[in-house]
Image: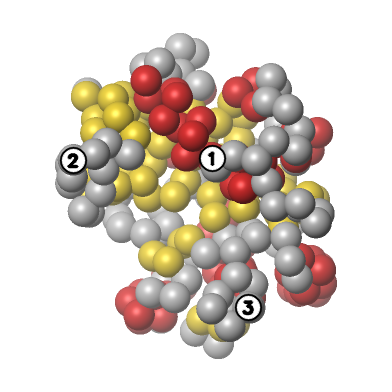
Amino acid sequence: MQIVVLAGGLTADQVPESLVMVGGKPFVDWQLDRFVASGVKSLVMCVGAQGEQIETHVRRALDRGLTVGYSYAGEQLVGTGGALRRALARLEEDFVVTYGGRYLPFDYSAPLQDLRAHPGAVATLTVGRGAGNVAVEGDWVSHYESPAGTGLVDSGAIALRRAALADIEDGAVWPLEALLRKLARQKKLRAFSAPEPGFDVESPELGGYLGGLPHLL
């Protein structure tokens, strides 16, 4: 199983989200522990400004049996989708993509298992309860970024087939959300319900949650 982390985000203080201190250690360490508990063997970090800091830390901290590769954004900002496309040569046939500032307390292999069980799907989106704008019909996403509130939100973990990126020009500037909107229109985007809500790295609730987390790992 492979996971791809879009880790180019910075805080207002220009600190990489992956390196924000949470519960006494950098946020990425919590993610790595969760990935390993989910059975991840291969990790690709898509990094941007200050990406060397992330790579240096992960190299020092990594004793988890993961194979880690890096894809640097370069000087031109290409958006989350463009960053994912830039990493194409490192991607497996299918994988899970998530964000450097997002933590989900669940099994990251679950949406990938769903995708593999449905050959007609191109991606499986993890959704949760919230003031969101993702509409679902049955087990399929009918609208992504619908204009009306639906009570469902993109939780921040997507299982995706590599083939979905192959025809996109490397260097094109685009957000990953554009691909998800397209797949929803084509009825090729499945919905997987997250058992618990996720957390953003700067969420006030995250530290308290992680304080009780070790029993899950």
Say whether disc 3 or disc 1 marks the residue closer to the N-terminus: 3
Asked whether the beta carbons under mark 3 and mark 1 sit within 8 Å of each other, the answer is no
* Residue 116 rendering spot, x and y as whole percentages: 51, 23
Give the residue number, with chain letter if any, for mark 3: 14
State the separation of the CA atoms marked 3 and 1. Answer: 23 Å
Which amino acid type corresponds to the residue marked 2 in the rendered image? Ala
Say whether residue 73 is visible: yes
Q: Please, which colouring scheme is shown?
A: secondary structure
Q: Of helix, strand and loop, which one carries label 1?
A: helix
Task: Report which residue position mark 2 lands on.
Answer: 148
- Amino acid type of the residue that numbered disc 3 sits on in the rendered structure: Gln
Residue 4 in percent (x, y) is at 64, 46
Q: Position of residue 179 (x, y in %)?
A: 51, 31
Q: Nearer the viewer, residue 133 or 94?
A: 133
Q: Which of 75/125 is in front? A: 75
Which residue sits at x=50%, y=21%? 122
Q: Mark 3 or mark 2: which comes first in sequence?
A: 3
At label 1, the amino acid type is: Leu
18 left or right, relative to 46: left
Which numbered dot is residue 176? 1
Q: Residues within 10 Å of mark 1 (few under 14, many from 20)?
A: some
**Secondary structure state at the residue bearing disc 3:** loop
